[in-house]
Amino acid sequence: MDGMSIVAVVIGTIAFTVAAPLLGCLLAGIDRKISARMQGRVGPPLLQPYYDVRKLLEKDRVSVNASEGLYISCALFFTLLAGGIFFSGGSVLMSVFVITLAALFFIVAAYSTRSPYAEVGANREILQVLAYEPMVLLVAVGFYMAIGSFDVAAALGAPVPAIATTGLLFIGFLFVLTIKLRKSPFDLSYSHHAHQEIVKGITTEMSGPTLAKVEVMHWCENVLFLGWVGMFFLWANPLSILAAVAVALFVYFLEIVIDNNFARVKWQAMLKWSWLVTIIAGGINIVLLTYL
Amino acid sequence: MSYITKSPWVIHYDASSCNGCDIEVLAALCPGYDVERFGIINTGNPKHADIFLVTGSVNEQNIGVIKEIYEQMVEPKVVVACGVCACSAGIFHDCYNVIGGVDQAIPVDVYAPGCAVRPEAIIDAVVAGLGVLDEKAQALKAQNKAQKKGA
Amino acid sequence: MGMIGFLILFPLVVALVLLCVKNNQARNVIASIAAATIAFASIALTVVYFGKDSFISLSSPVIDYICSAIGIIIAICILVYAVRYRNILAGVLALVQVAAALVFEFGFSHGIAVASGLYLDSLSLLMALVIGVIGSGICLYALGYMEDFQAEHADAPDRRPVFFALMFLFLSAMFGVVFSNNMLWLFTAWEITTICSFLLIGYTRTDEAIKNAFRQIVMNLLGGIGFTAALFFIAVNFHTLSFAEFIAAGAANPGLATLPVICLAFAGITKAAQMPFQSWLLGAMVAPTPTSALLHSSTMVKAGVFLLVKLAPIFAVSFVPSVMVILVGGVTFTFCSFMAISQSNAKRVLAYSTVANLGLIVACAGVGTPEAIWAAAFLIIFHAIAKSLLFLCVGTAEHHIGSRDIEDMDLLFERMPQLARYMMLGIMCMFIAPFGMLIAKWATLVSFVDTKQVTLIILLVFGSAATFMFWGKWLGKLAGIAGSPENDEQTVHRSEWVSILLMVVLVVACCVGLPFISLYVIEPYIATVFGTFSRGIADGNLVIASVATAFVVVVLFAGLGKGKAKKAEVYLSGISVDNEGRTFSNSLSKETAATARNWYMEHIFGEQAISGIGTVCTALIIVVAFLASVASLLGMF
């Protein structure tokens, strides 16, 4: 059985490596299209994110040191592994831990440049982890309590979806999801497309192919996070996968709306609000799950 | 056709000018003209930029900044001089501290005259710059290929 | 039997010899050989006796009398220092404790004979490995370190013989703690660790060192008095002084065991430096770094958690002590992790992280289920190895860059390339998956969820986020690369390299070998103590963690620094004057150096803001637990 699960993870990771960049790229394209429409613009072609990455890959390979590129490759690798673990039906908590490792490599890459702007971005990224990590861990715990296992596959055998008993946790998760998707008002360390950051926050010193890897990593992250959204809605009915996809897409649309309607907040506000939401929504839900 | 022509990211620097062209560049990047249609994005970071938009003339104080931004941009890259001051120092050309147009500091690929330069002219210039960018991208590719073969 | 006796007595003999040896060269040879001997002896013991849990019949009034004598000597020693430095409280506590101990020994304990004085099981073997391998590794490291230390403090008299004697005495006492089944002997060994750390903390004899040493002794004497009180209750209520019999009887009759277990847990909490007693361990940072490493990783505080983990079967059935230990541990974990964010002194960060991780182990012990003990055992292993590695690295860095401030470790990646990588490995092992510590935390989380410990779950998730913050930013500082500064690594002593490398190998071996350690070491122990065991983490995940660890280690030591991209300069938002030095010409044409400090968020996570709340909370928890247990005892009679 265990040999099977490791094979599943390997296959899952390979599949995720192929599928996630495709899906993530499309998502990013739709995101930019919808954002543009919300602002009364036509916006870029749907495949614009793909063009961007191809362009970055064509750029000259320069770096401020000989380690940054490897750190980013590791970050990308562990993002793919996290996705592979999750979508092969493995442990949610393991995928949370592995994606946190990816975040750490991303942060250390920025630190390694020893550039003042990149370091500001890295510090903010660490702060973002501090802000969202408690909620994300509680979501994994809540999933375990609702389904009886950390394994995503177990949800497909559950009589009712996790959302039936984890409504508050889901709302709390949506709140910190804004940080994880790097959307306003919580895109403190680095934000995508036209948003400006202090120079460019954590990615200040990354250019060309390295930046391309960061973009691809971001796509894959987005797919994984939407997977976490979807897992709340899985149950024994195979059709529930369609429901999960629909909800995930709706949530992504919601995040685009939020992104376009809020200005970036200060870090104090981000930390305060995300922890408050975690304690209230997460705490109450966990108490209810424990005693009901 | 290189992908760089589909995704030109710009960086904008305002040298010494009356700020008129500066405002027009920002206007061109505003939703009204929607340059994102062409994949154009305004970045604040030379390391991410492909096209360098400079407004205003070069003086003793800012020549170093212009050179440094240019140097930190990653190949392939093009420079667009926006407005008459950037092209030839315009009405400031006789000032004691003015060196001249942007081409006195770095190689310029496209000149977009005007006082102030109109957003349409800027967009035109950037599109013209794409052609240059494409050439440079092909050249870089060929060069890298040759290097790999040599190695 | 012979091997246990050897492990307890051999370090004692070495300590006596080292006390008399003044010659540097001779000391180096003796201490190195002794350290290696102890390490091999503990490994040999483990190999020979593994899986053969046994009690060793040993009962001798002579040893009892020796224990009493040691107790009196310790008390006299403390009294002398208390008089010399005019610390009344320490003197009074020492008197109270020795009086109580003597009354107990001659008034109560005489009718009670303990047939098996010593024992060994998987947990004590595991602890013996930690003490024997890591502890003696640290002693070895101290040889080189103390040479530099003495050179820096050339005006102070050379008291290294005393220092090394104390280090080895410490190891001997720790072996005594983990192998004694006779609680009187256990208590004596316990007290020896207290006095040893007192003397080691006060080693430099500066005002600060003396003050902190007394803080340590006062807090641990309180714990010692708790231990003595527990002995009274156990002797009166259970008519035994055998630790194993007490645990069995206590688990069968939790009501009667409540008060003694609370007293023992209190002793464990003081020794493990849990809030509200965390300040002694932070104060202990004034001591030379090998002392800190020894106190934090393999001895002293581990004696505290060892005691609590042993008591786990009683916690599992006894409500009040369990709640007390769980809450104290949980609050300590979270609050100390928060406070670590605000520290820039590397040793203080390490200290807070130690206290926090011990809090987690304490909480696991309090939960007392087999899964929690699995987690606790792994937390003990990984914490001991990674923390000693970090202390040794910080100590070496301090001697070569002249500071223990994290901000000054900027560019260590280039200045001390090997050391920085080892330090990065140690840090990663402390807080991030797939390394062992986080896998243990995962098991902790599962056991908290399974036992419905809602408070602990919430404390754990916030505390874990905080650990990411304070380790992450330190790791980042170490990783900085700019220019090619001079290599400061050439003058590191060989003994320091040897022991640091030992820890590195242990970290990698234990993280990669985690599935095997679980299967062959921890699970047998839990099976014998609890009868049943089902691990909260599937094997597949352990294997993934193990493989991923190997991957990260390869990247760290073989991959970094080999990129072939063209060299670019960093962006400084101005005209670079010296890009490698990060100086630029600012808008007024003046030179400015661009610097970035890490965030410490003093006003949110500062000690002032948090330690008060934590101290009050935990003190209240302990007081209420005591009152509740006394009330329940009165209600019973």
Image (cartoon, coloured by chain):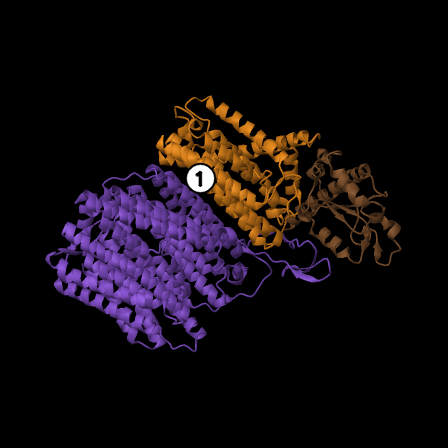
| Residue depicted at x 63% and y 42% | A57
Residue picked out by circle 1:
A137
In the picture, one chain is brown; tell me its letter. B
| Amino acid type indicated by mark 1 | Leu
| Disc 1: host chain | A
Q: Is residue C356 visible?
A: no
Q: Secondary structure at mark 1?
A: helix
Residue C474 screen position, x and y as percent: 50, 55
Residue C89: % across, % down: 31, 65
Rate crowding at label 1 as few (under 14), some (14 to 19) or many (20 or more) other CA atoms within 10 Å.
Answer: many
The one of A16 and C427 positioned closer to us in this rendering = C427
Q: Which chain is purple?
A: C
Q: Colour of chain A?
A: orange
Which x, y percent locates residue C334? Answer: 42, 48
Q: In the rendered view, does C150 fall on the left or right side of B130?
A: left
Residue at x 59% of width, y 51% of height? A120
Q: Is residue C589 visible?
A: yes
Report the front residue among C137 and A41. Answer: A41
Q: Is residue C269 above or below residue A50?
A: below
Which quadrant: the C terminus of chain C? top left
Quadrant in the picture for residue B29: top right
